[in-house]
Image (tube, helix red, strand yellow):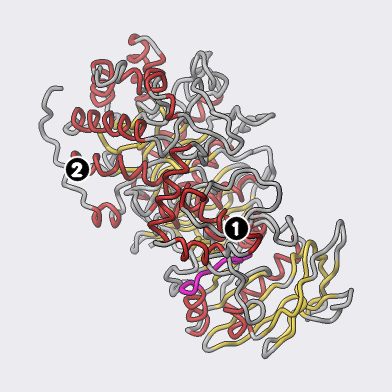
Amino acid sequence: MKPWIGDNRMPLNEDAANSSSRAASRGVGGLVYGGDYNPEQWPEEVWLEDVRLMREANVNRVSIGIFSWTKIEPQPGQFDFGWLDRVVDLLHANGVAVNLATPTASPPAWLVELHPEILPVTGHGVTLRAGSRRHYCPHAPQYRDAAKRIVRALAVHFRDHPALALWHVDNEYSCHIGECFCDQSKAAFRVWLERRYGTLDALNAAWATTVWSQLYTSWQQVEPPHPLPAFGNPSHQLDWRRFSSQSWIDCFLDQKAILREITPAVPVTTNFMGFHPTIDYWALAAAEDVVSNDAYPETSDPDWAIDAAMASDLMRSIGEGRPWLLMEQAVAYATWRDQNSTKRPGVMRLGSYQSIARGADGVMFFQWRTSQAGAEMHMIGLVSHGGIDNRQWREATALGGELARLSELAGSRVKAKVAILFDWTNWWALETEGKLDAAIRLMPHVRELYAALFRIGVTVDFAQPGSNLAGYSLVVAPHLYLVDDAGADNLCRYVEGGGTLLMSFFSGLVDDKVHIRLGGYPAPFREILGLRVEEFAPFAGSMTNGMRTEDGRRFECRTWADVVRVDGAEALATFEADFYKGLPALTRHRYGKGSALYLATRPDEAGVAWVVGRACETAGIAASPGASSAVEIVRRSDGVRSWMFVLNHSDEAVEVPLEGSGVELISGQAVEGSLRVAPVDLAIVRTQ
């Protein structure tokens, strides 16, 4: 590897990495634009055509080497960097920076042949073989050692290359395989439990093993939660989920430690998958320098923009507000669904700008050049099988040209007045077996509350129960079934100090060991809510009820009702029927300087909108004029300038009122009073 002159990167220590607003766009001087590049799939003469087209499309960053382990290390300990040197040099000479991946998501066949024990095992005892990807157990020391060896070799070899902008560790941790039940995993689980609890007595107490005679008298008796003849122990199941999540994070930390040691100036990421259920992204994001996400919304769904926006807001939130990267999105369609619809004209552009509006400092695609063969050969890239004479290429090059002129946005941030509490531990605990009604699931409820806020143009952060909530006017707590003492105390202090809390039913029921909190439901929040839940009344089958509001409206209710007795709270809506007729469906209680609202049922869409509206009214939050389910309004700011994004997802032009005047960035035109946005189009207005 030849030495490179003039690289002026400063070391990026942990604090600097996590506080930098420019880490996501490092090395490009503006917004990142590009995609996954897999040159090893093509003869070298194609590479020259690739970089020519990259310049034409204004591509400034590509991810390379993601699935190149065998190509880089064809035999154990024997490395071939020649082809990768030529690619990276060629990209650098053409103004393209690289996210250099550690290729550990797909172990080589030679490693599986030498150590078949690295293969993952399902809960039913089936060993999953090589031939696809992600075929490894995160607890296999043979895999972990081999992964660290190639990461070190890569870091040493490329540490001085000026094209290196970002380390891309592994790929989509726990995709396809979220847990492994092999003997190595069993042993690792026991070690993890012994470190967590110290003694068997403490484990037995935490898991309440006197129930169903599950008492353990030896660590060797403890197994992962295999398929069982009846309901499993929820405390056992939750600890398994915690352990499995931490195992993937430990794999990341293995690699990050090596990369930080050898290339302290280069930030590190690994790509997330939105609301992915098997890893606590709060914990993993805390170890990253830049959060990145892979987003593949189903754009045939009329409300696809809501789901995509929600994932974008999560990425911004878990990165503590720092700019993030959309690492992967489809140019046109994905391939893993039974039916895969294409992105219609303008939709790819809208989705890209939506990510930027919600805090991303760049957008990338899977992939640059469409594969000719293999598992993803039908997933179209920026360069398709037929070349570049097509709509997708024309849209992609136009987008790249626009983004190249919008460098002023890089590093700016999004501020939100509302936070929705989202905690992976609560998600795992809520969706264990035996909870009265399987219809109580976290994500559908989070989405319906988020959608109500989206439709009135209220930007949302996500937060944990223990987060600093002081900057939020409204905090929404959907199905906060599990909350630890610190989180519960934090929420009570938030309300007492002047915040507004909207909490929904089935909240505050268990502690962090999944033990019921005694003293009446919801025990930790009864005082701030000013009520007591006397009884649960889950609905059977297709049963519904109605709730009548204080202002005379009526909404249908589904799934559930709490039988509520107020103790200081006022009823804003009451149930229409059944033995709890006339009792509260929505309450509000003044507590300290703030207010707490409690939703005792699951209303229909219109009812959720009304509930969210009352909560916003209590918190002093106004809707954004012009916002709707089809018109998205978000703002970024750098403290001096502000940029208002208006995205029109509808098939009709819209007129959105403006406060004052500004400049629309894409057209360069001055605007004042109102803004007209064409169908499936957007505008970005800069104001001081």
Q: Position of residue 235 (x, y in %)?
A: 56, 59
Magenta region, residue range:
479-487
Q: Amino acid at mark 1?
A: Gln
Q: Amino acid at mark 2?
A: Glu
Disc 2 target residue: 261
Q: Nearer the viewer, residue 121 or 244?
A: 121
> Which mark, residue 592?
none
Residue 262 vertical position relative to residue 417 in the rendered view, above or below = above
Q: Position of residue 292 (x, y in %)?
A: 42, 44
Disc 1 target residue: 214
Which residue is located at x 38 percent, y 62 percent?
A: 688
Identify the image quadrant of the N terminus.
top left
Q: Is residue 486 magenta?
A: yes
Under tag 1, what secondary structure?
Answer: loop
Residue 216 vertical position relative to residue 303 in the rendered view, above or below = below
| Principal secondary structure, stretch drawn in magenta | loop
**Is residue 664 found left or right of 265 in the rendered image?**
right
**Is residue 591 found left or right of 609 in the rendered image?**
left
Marks 1 and 2, the one that precedes in the sequence: 1
- The single residue placed furthest to the right in the displayed view is 578
